[in-house]
Image: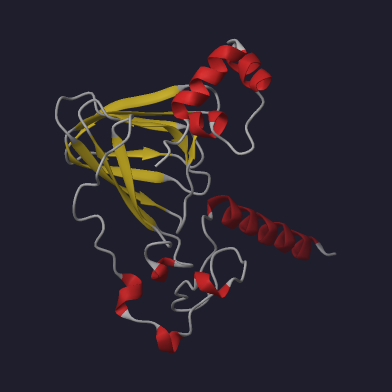
Amino acid sequence: MSPTNNTFAIFVIFCCAISFAFASDPDTLQDLCVALPSSGVKVNGFACKAESNVTEADFFFAGLAKPGVINNTVGSVVTGANVEKIPGLNTLGVSFSRIDYKAEGLNPPHTHPRATEIVFVLDGQLDVGFITTANKLISKSIKKGEIFVFPKGLVHYQKNNGDKPASVLSAFNSQLPGTVSIAAALFTSTPTVPDDVLAQAFQIDTKKVDDIKAKLAPKKT
């Protein structure tokens, strides 16, 4: 291979590496691909609805207009506006959510494995933060009209330390960012993480592990 061709090959590989490094969801190859979950086809996303059957309803969602109903012990609720609620988001690489907090409410430490998150405060004031892979906490208090960013995949949280309700809008660079709640994932998974693993990891006894599992277990309806 000539030096020119070799340089060109290295350039192409470098460009591809940059593309993969900054990509979120795959780029779309057509104008639209409205999700059709009922197809049963398993792909990286959803199969497309026939374009002749697409309507404006596939691109509309009114579920973020009002605060969500909070009926849990942590004092917050997330209302998602992702491809599962808006089929037209399929392949577009974006989604949204609204998070509402009671006074003293918490959105517990969690991660989004497929997306970076940016939050805009609608009302109230929140203490927010994320933890880097170097175990450094990056945190700040944010108020109405302000924005904060949580990098993709890093553990983060939001806490309303005020005496009034708060709410934010969140945007993601994925149609379905996914959420892994740290406490719930470790203590309420199915099958369960062995007690001795959790006891050793958190340096507590297995009785305490069982107590935590009981507190975090989904409430039976």
Q: Who is closer to the viewer here, 196 or 219?
A: 219
Q: Would residue 187 be found to the left or right of residue 7 on screen?
A: left
Q: Look at the image and tell me in which quarter the C terminus lies.
A: top left
Picture mark count = 0
Q: Who is closer to the viewer here, 4 or 44?
A: 44
Q: Residue 220: image x %, image y %? A: 43, 38
Q: Would residue 39 be found to the left or right of residue 103 on screen?
A: right
Rendered image quadrant of residue 121: top left
Q: Look at the image and tell me in which quarter the N terminus lies.
A: bottom right
Q: Residue 156: image x %, image y %? A: 42, 32
Q: Residue 80: image x %, image y %? A: 35, 52
Q: Who is closer to the viewer here, 198 or 81?
A: 198
- Residue at left offset 58%, top offset 15%: 202
Q: Residue 118: image x %, image y %? A: 35, 44
- Residue at left offset 24%, top offset 31%: 142
- Residue at left offset 61%, top offset 14%: 206
When the figure is inspected, residue 98 is found, relative to residue 10, above or below; the finding is: above
Q: Would residue 11 be found to the left or right of residue 144 on screen?
A: right
Q: Which residue is situated farthest in the bottom direction here?
A: 52
- Residue at left offset 67%, top offset 18%: 196
Visual colour scheme: secondary structure
When the figure is inspected, residue 152 is found, relative to residue 141, above or below; the finding is: below
Rendered image quadrant of residue 39: bottom right
When the figure is inspected, residue 85 is found, relative to residue 135, above or below; the finding is: below
